[in-house]
Each structure stands twice: as C-alpha cells, then as structure tokens.
Image (tube, grey):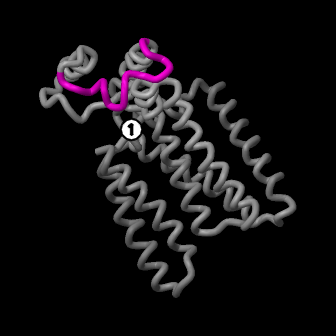
Amino acid sequence: KNQVGLMAEIGILVSIIAVFLKGSAAARALYGGVPFLLGAVCLVLSSSATSVLSLGVTLFVLGGFFVVGILPRLFRWVGVAGFIGFVGVIGIILYAMDLQIFKLVLEGFGKSTTLTGRTYLWEAGIEVAKERPFLGHGYNAVWVPGNPVAEAFWAKFLIEGKSGFNFHSILIEWFVSLGGAGLVMICALFSVVILGAVRAIVRQGITPFNAFILAFAVMFLVRAFVEVDLNG
C-alpha cells in the first residue's frame, strides 16, 4: 500500500505542476486533471498515512515558495526567511500541542503511535548502527539470510520469505549500512538539491522545473523519516 501511495503522490504532484506548463488550456486540463483524479483515487484506496502527510507537507512548502517566486526579486530572500520563520512557529505550536494533530491523523488511518511497529525498528536499527558507527555494516549487508540481526527481525514480524524488509527510515537504513559517512551523504544530497531549488526560485522565480525539483526533494525528505524509497 505504501508503494501505491507513493505512486499516487507522485502523480498528484506532477499533475499539479503540469497545469502551469505552456500549452492550450485543453492540453493542460488533460495532462493535469486526469492524472490528478486518478492519483487522488489511488491515494485514498492506499490508506497510506505516510503518503497523505508527506503530500500535505510538500504542497504546503510548494505553496509557500510559489508566493516567494512571484515576489519582486529584491524581496525574495526576505520571503524565504519569512517562510522559514513561519514554519518554525508552526513547529513550535505543534510541539507545544504535543503533536496531537499527528496523533489524530494516525488514528484516522487506524495507526498506532508506534507507526505499525516502526518505532521499534528505529530503536533497534540505531542500536545495530552503534556497533559500527563510522562506515556501517556494509551496503545491504544486514538483510541477508543467516545474519542474526536480520533473522531476529524476520522471525519477530513473521516474514518467512526473508526478503523485502528494511528499517523503514532511509536515514537509519543508511546509518546501519554505511555508518555516519552514509548518513552525512544522504543528508548532504537532500540539502544540496533543496537549497539549489530554492536558489533557482529566488533567481528565476517559480517555474515548472524549479517547482518539480523542490516538490520531489521535499517529498522524499519527508518520507525519508518513515520509508526507504531511495535505497535501490
């Protein structure tokens, strides 16, 4: 269901951006409206809380930078600073509310606060990573038959096929596999892409290409905390 949710999320984002491409109104409606409806239906059917939340965050950020992009160029960095400050205020409010809104959303999807066992996986993954904190255990070296760590997880979660499993966080997955070096690399990747997109928006204004890069970078960053979408 998470993969269906991811594909639906991608379809919705692309369809929204497609509306701003050059061309006739009919073409934009076709390439934007139809994929949007299909993506929305698939997103609902997937019941993926991760996809819904990450899509919401991505659209919020995209909307904020759309406003920044239409400002006069002289004021765009001021707009970026103001938007970051606004996000910070929202974060403080959510923290003061003990993240109750997220708990309500999880309850709406029938999820517990453990995120279907993810919190256990994260804690266990961090403990495994601490054994080799600098360069890790090796790329995908943990999830192989015969490895006591993997065998214990497969037994706990009743996975007889002994495949298709991970720590449900790309940050922890890379920390385990590639150690602190891998964690720095994946964080640097997200930072460079997002900052590059922001810089392009400040210089050029909002364009479909800039919006596409920013939207997908933010989407995968949000999902990185709870999914492993970039581990191929």
| Picture residue at 37% right of the left edge, 26% below the top | 138
Return the x and y of residue 143 as percentages of the image width and height. 27, 27
Q: Which part of the image, by quadrant, shows the N terminus?
A: top left
Q: Give the side of residue 185 with respect to residue 121, left or right.
A: right
Return the x and y of residue 214 as percentages of the image width and height. 59, 55
Q: Which part of the image, by quadrant, shows the C terminus?
A: top left
Magenta region includes residue 140: yes
Residue type marked 1: Val
Q: Which residue is mark 1?
A: 228
Numbered range of the magenta stretch = 131-145
The secondary structure that most of the magenta stretch takes on is loop
| Picture residue at 38% right of the left edge, 50% below the top | 6
Tag 1's secondary structure?
Answer: loop
Does residue 119 appear anywhere in the picture? Answer: no
Question: Which image quadrant for residue 2?
Answer: top left
Question: Which image quadrant for residue 96?
Answer: top right
